[in-house]
Image (cartoon, rainbow, N blue to C red):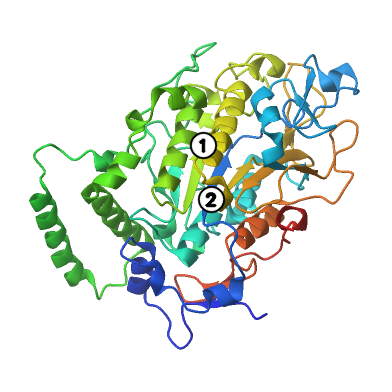
Amino acid sequence: MEAAVFPSPGRAWSRRDILRAGSLSFAASALPAHLDAAAGAARADAVIFLWMAGGVTHIDSFDPKPDAPAEIRGKLGVIPTTLPGVQFCETMPRLARVAHELALVRSYSHDSDDHLLSQVYTLSGHKVAMSDLYTHPNIGSLVAHLHGPRGGLPGYIAVPGTTRPGPPPYNFFRGGWLGAHHAPFCVGGVPAEPDFTVAEKLDNPPSLADEKLQPQSLAAPLELTGDRLDRRAGLREGFDTLLRRLDRQPEVAAQDAGFESALRLARNARIRDAFDLDREAPAVREEYGRTKLGGRCLLARRLVEAGARFVMVDYGYDSDYGNIWDNHNAPTQNHPPIQDMVRRGYHLAGMDRAFAALLTDLKARGMLGRTLVVYLTEFGRTPKINSNGGRDHWGAAGSMFFAGGGTRTGQVIGATNKHAAEPTTRPITPADIAATLYSALGIAPHTIVKDFQGRPRPILERGEVIREVLG
């Protein structure tokens, strides 16, 4: 089958067209008619992308090795799951009870131990060099570009979208060659402390947090009525007419698209309510856990329920907790040994609770069948616990999972050796994960689209659909 090319044949889109395609004024019906024919049938119509940046330990979560030497297995035990013969680390009791809802990949692997290279690879599906960290769009950006926004919500939302690996801080939530206006709508805006290492951290910070996730753009001043909003929009249109002939820079286009998104969100009471966690029943809020991660997962469910197409739950580097998953236990880190760290409510204990609640909640509401849930981190951690009690970067092996969205769940895909150091089966790469995600949404993984300069580009250069997941 020949790959689809966007925009439609015979006409190259102007930058203005591309801007409108990225804004909320672009309706799904405006997509090229040959999209479905090129892509195949979609199994899912929404994605919740659980992005845990920093490198989550696979041995202390989904791939324990109880028979390994003590310097590898540590002191943590294992527990049975709802899958016969499959064990998780004792840190995952709630996910163990819903393991039948997972397509767990234990052979996740690639060849980089570098945070920056690995995070770009996992967010985009493209393997890059240091000179290309900002070149490629996020997977969510391409999904939004190809499928458009829905339900009055931006096509790609990051909750909160403030993760910045550092120092110095890098923002990898990018539109890349699609243009800056295809970056996600970040509910957290610009982080107050983009370098998470700057602020002083407590030795044992509290995990409970009442995080405010409603975008500031939705908190309009009381005196700003609907009429005044309309007048401001009209004034903006007047200026926009004057600028129409200018060949604007990408950052200007991004500001314009952000203005249009914020304006439409602010005008829609139903959308404003979707961002308000206080409207959720207290019992549901408790089930997710009153942690930052619990609140972010709950908001993701609310946004998908309201019509959002692609929501990233962003959790990994934090002004209160530091580099949550990057547990070297270096002298500069305020961490206990990793196998004590995992018990904290903002670490694996909180992840276990929030993820299990999300899957259970989606299923109870009849949403899981059409919502693809993907948990991903950039790499695992070293099999051997280091001299400080931590684990270091380990691209060779890690764990991730798919759930919902028409995937074949209730299975473990792949395996690692007796030390969880490398796969003993076919390695699953970030490009394979991206290909599988696209395919689940009805997007051919090697579709060609045009960048903001009109040049054709493949959405993926390599990567194959994981057939065990989609069947």
How many badges with numbers are in the image?
Answer: 2
Tell me which label, 2 or 1, sits earlier in the chain.
Answer: 2
Q: Residue at x 73, y 39 (%)?
A: 399
Q: Position of residue 151 (x, y in %)?
A: 36, 55
User: In the structure shown, which secondary structural element does the residue marked by tag 2 occupy?
Assistant: strand
Mark yes or no: residue 426 visible.
yes
Q: Quadrant of the C terminus?
A: bottom right
| Amino acid type at mark 1 | Pro
CA separation in Å, label 2 and label 1: 30 Å
In the foreground, 315 or 87: 87
Image check: 252 left or right of 242?
A: right
Q: Position of residue 149 (x, y in %)?
A: 40, 59
In the orientation shown, which residue stands out farthest toward the bottom? 10
Image check: 143 left or right of 326?
A: left
Q: Residue at x 34, y 39 (%)?
A: 275
Q: Which residue is mark 2?
A: 47
Q: Which residue is mark 1?
A: 168
Q: Position of residue 184 (x, y in %)?
A: 43, 51
In the foreground, 299 or 456: 299
Local crowd at mark 1 within 10 Å, few (<14), some, or many (≥20)?
few
